Amino acid sequence: MKTITLASYGKVNISLDVGEVMANGYHFVDMIMCQILLHDIVQISIFQNDEASNVDAHVRSGNIAMPQIEISANWPFVPCDERNICHGAVVRFLEKFIKTDRLKGKYHKIPYRVEIVLKKRVPVGAGLGGGSGNAAAVIHGLNALLGTHFSMRELMKLGAELGADVPFAVMNQAKSCKSVPSYLRNDKLACVCARATGIGTELSPVKMPPRDVILVKPPFSVSTRDVYKGIDSCVIEKRPNNDELVSILEELAQIDLGTEADIHDKTILTGHTKLGKKLINHKLGIDKKSDELWDEAYEQMINVLENYTVQNSKFLQRLKQKLEGARETRHTMMSGSGPTIFAILNDANRKKIYYLKNKLKFKGNDVIVTEILDGRSSGIAKKKKRGL
């Protein structure tokens, strides 16, 4: 038996625009997705035969059987059969494994049993990419356990067959999970924030400074298919300019890194008064510039799907108004097709955030404080605590 454990991160959409329906029946989208610290834990175990000869003989005769797939989860309402996307991830991965020419003669590696244990933390049916992240974890896990050495693009293409959000999950887990092979962690596509176009599977990395956020998942879910079908009949008055948003985020990321470098040595401020004052004044100027840029960024952080999901739910309308009216929040919007509403927090202290969190816990809302990550270091899950 071989086992691997990965963190399966959630995501939020800080921008989402939708175009017309394409010939393939999907809508054209242009959106920016960001990894959040909140994550599930996915443990994958494989059981293989010790003898290669019999297995290889079966493969040569065309008699290839899929392994027994066993899935368990800590939440009773999570399906643990073929309905779970992880089941499909195992099947699709092994089908690709079998068809890969360079792996001929190694078919004895095909496991006869695969066990997947899900420790769910990301709310289900929330527009936070929980299921997509689980599928990506299975893809990464099998790639590592079987030593298939698939490229990032190969894994992303495989993920796209399972769902539009899976390729991004493949990218962000490669950036943030130490258990992923180093050649993937060092790939230029490994990132925690990306712009997605097409049906959401054409991805390019984007730099995004870290932000604290509060997530509110209502006690109900929405159908993504219904939302995309309904948006066609909605009048959309304001759309995001994602070119401009990416440019602003890139500038903010540079400022954030520069500010950190300027103030990393506190002895300068305490030991040299004149120099300390210059650095303080310099930092105040940077903070002002940063605030101005964030205000510009918030203007472009728009999810056009709110025109259907939020406008058709008085509950979501009231929830969004509560978040927008809170002193602790800077910008409020919906993630994905919903129904989760999230807000970027200001620099309020933890006590105030705790009070805000409690005020939002009504009628079964699931309220979580976490953060958008910037991906400066690998192994984030092991270095930071999970969201509150």
Image: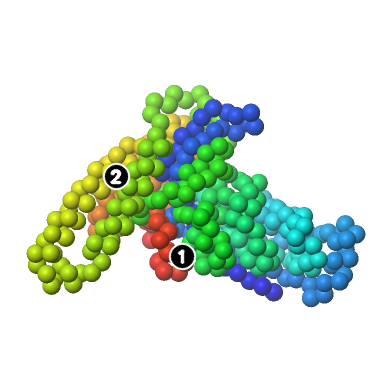
Q: In the rendered image, is residue 373 in sight?
A: yes
Residue furthest left in the image:
274
Taking the image as shown, residue 54 lies to the left or right of residue 219, namely right
Q: Residues within 10 Å of mark 1 (few under 14, many from 20)?
A: some
Identify residue for label 1: 378
For marks 1 and 2, give the CA distance. Answer: 26 Å
Mark 1 and 2 residues: CB-CB less than 8 Å, in contact? Answer: no
Residue 353: name its quadrant. Answer: bottom left
Quadrant holding the C terminus: bottom left
In the image, residue 363 above or below residue 314: below
Identify residue for label 2: 294
Identity of the residue drawn at 45% across and 38% down: 16
Q: What is the basis of the colouring in this image?
A: rainbow
Identity of the residue drawn at 9% across and 67% down: 273
Q: Label 2 is placed on what type of residue?
A: Trp
Q: Label 1 is placed on what type of residue?
A: Ser
Residue 152: name its quadrant. Answer: bottom right
Identity of the residue drawn at 57% across and 28% down: 21
Residue 168 image position (x, y, % from top left): 53, 50
Residue furthest right in the image:
61
Residue 28 image position (x, y, % from top left): 54, 33
Residue 313 image position (x, y, % from top left): 43, 34
Q: Between 78 and 11, which is closer to the camera in this rendering?
A: 11
Identity of the residue drawn at 57% across and 38% down: 199
Give the mark nearer the N terminus: 1 vs 2: 2
Q: In the rendered image, is residue 119 in sight?
A: no
